[in-house]
Structures are given as structure tokens and as C-alpha cells.
Amino acid sequence: MGLLNRIFGHRKTETVSLPRRVQVVRGRYDAATINDDNRRHWANADGLSANAANSPEVRRRLRNNARYEVANNSYAKGIVLTLANDCIGTGPRLQMLTDNPEVNRVIETAFAEWARLIRLAEKLRTMRMGKAEDGEGFGIIVNNPTLSMPVQLDLRLVEADQVATPFFTPMASYAVDGIVFDTSWNPVEYHVLRNHPGDTVRVQTLEYDTVKAEAVIHYFRADRPGQARGIPEIMSALPLFAQLRRYTLAVIAAAETAADHALVIYTDAPANGEADSLEAMDTVELEKRMATVMPGGWKLAQTQAEQPTTTYAEFKKEVLNEIARCLNMPFNIAAGNSSGYNYSSGRLDHQTYYKAIRVEQSHIETVVLDRILNAWLSEAVLIEGLLPQPARIKGARFAHQWFWDGHEHVDPAKEANAQDTRLKNNTTTLAHEYAKQGLDWESELRQRAKEVALMNQLGLSMAQATPAPVPVADNQNTEDGQTPEE
């Protein structure tokens, strides 16, 4: 033992105090529990990233389904068209904010003429519709020598199907189908197929052009961080669109089936009862104003039409309301029917819708319009005599803003009184009030000054030049069912 102690040494025994046992509280969420009741409901839930979930095949199927519904469902078509018309309207208008009025006037006039020639408003509406049903819109800034203007830039629209990389693999580093990124995930180049995958050409090739990111406008909404491609905005409503059409077709089919059988002959006699023999499923041609006698033991009855049911209209209303919710659109705009609204309800619902429109317009200004303006200015400064000399600064960024069509007020008289009150107590400006109508306050004041000068020249008073007011009908409601006298 002494030898062993010398070899291994003497180990002292120490008393260690164990910490007090801590009770762990485990939280639990009902939504995180998978049981027999909700197993099928959450069966398709996954942990894929945004780009993996929006794979090329998934996006292709979503685009095809959305296009089919928009093409065949009048509600879907109307909703998409209304959204594009309300967002874009007649097109954005540029207002320059430099300190030189001459520079502002020349740039605004030249850009407006160029935008009219390339049909910019029409292309923006197409891109907005593409974002709703395809999930994204692509525009390539190209040179168009056929334009009758010194600046020969143009915007060529490309469908989302055509922006793709053939033989793309999701494992490619810094690349998402059709887009190549740098190490900071900034787009560097886009791959644009020379032929649309759905073209009915004799020879379908997979050749593509590489377009620098500076020349490509990619307009989509990123719902998740890191998302590089868009999915249709009406995606969540696609099953509802299908159900709406199927239910309507089922109602029509049921009504037609009932109408096909004008009369039915039946008997109350038991199975072995006495009744004249008739041939089963036989048909009889009926004539107008004809009287007939039934065989013994048989009666004549008319088929009762059970369709449409009393809940048919309510079903369509609820489904349309749910469909429009994913677009922040109120029911009366989606359905094109405000019969169930009063004045206050209509304005309250429209506030959320118009706020969503303003957010979308701000997105379009940043992603689309500012880039188009910068490309246009870069070309314009190189053309001798097009812009004033103070504006011919290559690469300069001038202060500016965009005007959109204003939304008409339901009660113009009330809005005019409110504007007058706000201007008198200095809680608004003429620029802000005109901007809400999509107008440039400087241009409107200059026009007003010309009108006043002409009235003075012709010796007309303000009362003589003002149009006579239109009388309001006695039964015209204004707010909450009240007439103007009330």
C-alpha cells in the first residue's frame, strides 16, 4: 500500500456542495402542437427559405394558375384592372424642385413628351397588372432609334417567364433563377431568354442574353427577407376564385337540370297497388293550352326549382370580401357594387385602400420611376441644346417629386369647405392641397392668374365668370341617408 501511495499519490477527499435543483418551466403554444385534429391542416408547412420556397417550378405553376383565373373569372379580371387603374391612373407627372424655374420647366416638358411617346403610363399599368397576377414585372431600358425625340431611350417589358437561367440549380452560389448577385447580394446581371418558354416557335432554344443590372427594372414585393423573385399577389385568393366559379356553375347546372324536366308523373299507390301500367322513363311532347287525363293511379306534378338558394348572394359576397382582403381592397370596389354602403362606411373602407395605393405609388417611384428618370437625364445632358446649361451636369441628381391622379371626393362641397378651413388656420398649404388632386400648384396658380387677367381685360366680374351651381335633387342622400336639407 505504501508503494501504491507513492506511485499514484495521496488523494484528498473534498466535500463539494451541489447547487440547488432548479425547476425548468417549459412554455407551450397550441399552434406549435401537432395532433390528430390539426395534422392534416399543417401537413404542408415547411422551413424552406424564401428563395427555396419560391422555386422556378412553384412560381411557374402559380403564374399559370393566376393567369388562368384572371382570363376566365370576370371578378379576378376586374380586380386586377381596377388595381392597376387606381395605382397608375393616367400616369405619373414629374415636378422638378431645383432653384432655377427655367430648368424645371424645360426638364418637365421634355420628360413629359418623351413619356407620352414611349407610352410610359400604359407600360406602368401593365407592370402593375403583372405584379398582381405574375408576382413581378421586368422592364429593360433599351435604345429605340425610331423615337422622334433626341432622347431615344425606351422601356421594353419582359414577362417573368423569360427571366430565367437554363439548367439552373438551386445550389448555385449567389444566384437565383435568372439573377446573379455579388457577395453583398446586390443584383449584378439578369439572364433573359431570347424566346418566351411558351412561344409556339418551330425551334425552341435555350439561348439567353446577359443584361447588366443597371439596365433592368425588377418590380416586385418582397414578403420575406432575402426574397429575390416575386409571387402573385392574388396567390392566397386563387382557391377562392376557383370556388366562386365552381359554385356559380353548380347553381346554374342545378337550375338547368330542374328546368329540363317540365313535368313528372308519379303515383301514390304502393308497390303492389292498383295503377295503370306505364313505361318507365318515357317522355311525352307537350303542346300549348292542352288538356289531358292521367292514367288511373297516376298524378302530374311540376319539378320545383331549388336553385339559386337564398344564401347564394351572401356566399358570393363573403367570398369576394375575403378575396379582396389580400389586396387591401374593400368589397364595394372589388364587387363594383356599393348598394349596401352609406356615405360614412364607404369613406372608412376607402381610407385603408387609398393608403395602400399611396404605399404602392411610393414603391413605384423608388424602384421604377427614379431609375427611369436618372437614365433619361444621363442621356439628355449629352444632347446639345436639349437642356439649359445649368442642368447639363453629368451624373447630377436633381430634387424632384412625382404627382399621381387625385381621388375624387364623394362630397366635393364638404371637401372644399374643409380645404378653406385648413388654409385659413395654416394647417395645410396650397402645394399639399393641389398635390392631393394630382396637380402642380405652380402651374395651377399661373393658369389662374391668366384667367383673372383675361376676366379683367374683358370686364367680367368673378360672379359672371363662375358657372351656375347645379341644383341638388330632393331625394339625393349625402351622408348616413340624410338629405342636404337635413
Image (cartoon, grey):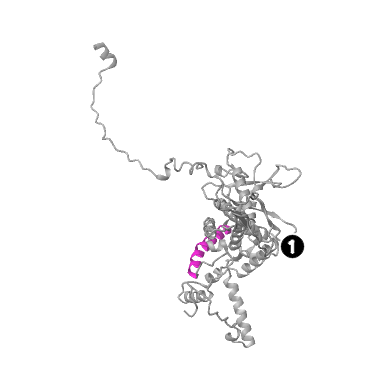
Of the pair 163 and 42, the residue shown nearer to us:
42
Q: For the residue carrying disc 1, how many other residues have a C-alpha within 10 Å: few (<14), some (14-19), or many (20+)?
A: few
Of the pair 154 and 397, the residue shown nearer to us:
154
Q: Quadrant of the N terminus?
A: top left
Q: Is residue 476 left or right of residue 201?
A: left
Q: Is residue 433 left or right of residue 60?
A: left
Point out residue 237 in the picture as x, y percentages from the top left corner. Answer: 55, 53
Residue 245, quarter of the rendered image: bottom right
Magenta portion: prevailing SS class: helix
Point out residue 217 in the picture as x, y percentages from the top left corner. Answer: 62, 53
Q: Which residues are magenta?
A: 343-365
Residue at screen point 57% across, 86% down: 463
Of the pair 331 and 296, the residue shown nearer to us:
296
In magenta segment, residue 413: no
Quickly name the residue at label 1.
Answer: 148
As drawn, the residue found furthest toward the bottom would be 459
As drawn, the residue found furthest toward the front would be 274
